[in-house]
């Protein structure tokens, strides 16, 4: 039986098919891509995917645009439900008892959401997915606060309030401020290094935490609620805000430093094909 490479007629049919075609290396899938600003900083961009021609079957099943639409609609639906529930209780239609006044909760929910909408509007972050996820996390934190009041979780579970202050008042708030400053840097509005950005995010988080505690004091005086238990409880809340913000900012600084260092290393040592061109 003749070997396949001895069949000259077969070679004439097959060989032209592969002549002149380059074998392209497929880059690995990255979870988060980054975009570089004029001053050398990096910000999170849309999750990177393989080229469309290499995986057409995946693009038909999953789309980042579809995910963003789902997140936006989910945020609107959950927020509308929460505001409606709080408004019905504030009007006396529903009769759920809370230690914090319903009007105060409604003001808190509306104020936080309006502030975030303004922040993300002016920031115009390069990743809509990241912004929508942060919005969803904020809505979840607002739900945790309201449901904690309704079911007396702040009194039943000792660490419930501490968890909320650490993750929502500290880590989540610091993440939003950090990515806001990064986005402004990418757009050329400001020019700050990674450590300076983290410092401003940290101090801004602490300032907002202090402002929130003052707001609770004012609302207690106006509505007669009892959100501020004691001075030690207030100090404990501020400390948790501090540690929560520091924890996430350390992670963000390490991540962006690694991305920046890897990019500079790639610029100094270009690929052989790029160097030949």
Image: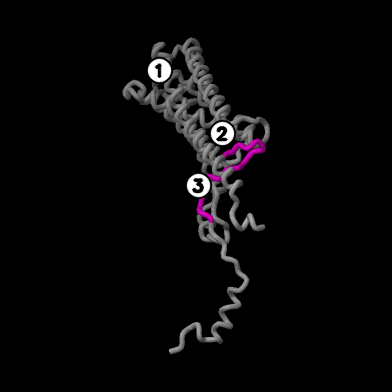
Dot 2 falls on a residue whose secondary structure is helix
Question: Residue 151: horizontal and vertical position, in percent?
Answer: 36, 26
- C-alpha separation, residue under disc 1 versus residue under disc 2: 26 Å
Q: Where, quadrant-wise, is the N terminus in this rendering?
A: bottom left
Q: Secondary structure at mark 1?
A: helix
The residue that disc 2 covers is 179
Callout 3 secondary element = loop
The answer to whether any part of residue 142 appears in the image is no
Residue 33 in sight in this render: yes
* Residue nearest the observer in this picture, 73 or 276: 276
Q: Is residue 253 shown left or right of residue 22?
A: left
Query: Residue 236 shows which numbered tag?
Result: 1
Please check the rendered image and state whether residue 184 is part of the magenta-colored stretch, yes or no.
no
Q: In the rendered structure, which segment of residues is drawn in magenta?
A: 27-43
The structure residue drawn at horizontal position 46% and vertical position 88%, both measured from the top left corner, is 2
Q: CA distance from mark 3 to mark 2?
A: 17 Å
Compare residues 275 and 90 and report the one nearer the observer.
275
Mark 1 vs 3, N-terminal side = 3
Q: Position of residue 141 (x, y in %)?
A: 45, 30
Q: Could you say which quadrant of the image residue 263 lies in? A: top right
Across and down, in percent, residue 161 comes to 39, 23
For residue 31, which numbered disc appears in the image?
3
The colour scheme used to paint the residues is one colour
- Numbered tag placed on residue 177 in the rendering: none
Q: Earlier in the sequence, mark 1 or mark 2?
A: 2
Q: Is residue 12 left or right of residue 210?
A: right
């Amino acid at each position: 039986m003749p070997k396949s490479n001895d069949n000259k007629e077969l070679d004439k049919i097959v060989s032209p098919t592969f002549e002149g075609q380059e074998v392209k290396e497929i880059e690995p899938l990255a979870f988060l891509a980054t975009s570089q600003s004029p001053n050398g900083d990096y910000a999170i961009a849309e999750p990177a995917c393989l080229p469309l021609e290499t995986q057409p079957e995946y693009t038909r099943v999953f789309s980042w645009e579809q995910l963003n639409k789902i997140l936006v609609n989910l945020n609107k639906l959950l927020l509308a439900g929460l505001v409606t529930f709080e408004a019905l209780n504030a009007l006396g239609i529903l009769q759920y008892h809370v230690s914090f006044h319903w009007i105060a909760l409604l003001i808190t929910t509306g104020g936080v959401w309006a502030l975030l909408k303004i922040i993300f509007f002016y920031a115009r972050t390069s990743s809509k997915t990241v912004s929508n996820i942060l919005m969803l996390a904020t809505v979840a934190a607002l739900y945790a606060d309201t449901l904690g009041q309704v079911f007396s979780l702040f009194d039943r579970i000792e660490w419930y309030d501490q968890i909320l202050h650490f993750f929502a008042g500290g880590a989540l708030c610091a993440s939003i401020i950090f990515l806001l400053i990064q986005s402004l840097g990418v757009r050329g509005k400001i020019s700050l290094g990674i450590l300076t950005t983290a410092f401003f995010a940290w101090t801004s988080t602490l300032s907002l935490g202090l402002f929130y505690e003052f707001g609770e004091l004012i609302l207690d005086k106006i509505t007669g609620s009892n959100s501020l238990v004691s001075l030690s409880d207030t100090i404990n809340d501020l400390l948790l805000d501090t540690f929560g913000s520091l924890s996430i900012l350390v992670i963000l600084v390490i991540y962006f430093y690694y991305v920046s260092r890897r990019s500079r290393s790639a610029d100094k040592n270009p690929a052989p094909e790029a160097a030949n061109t």
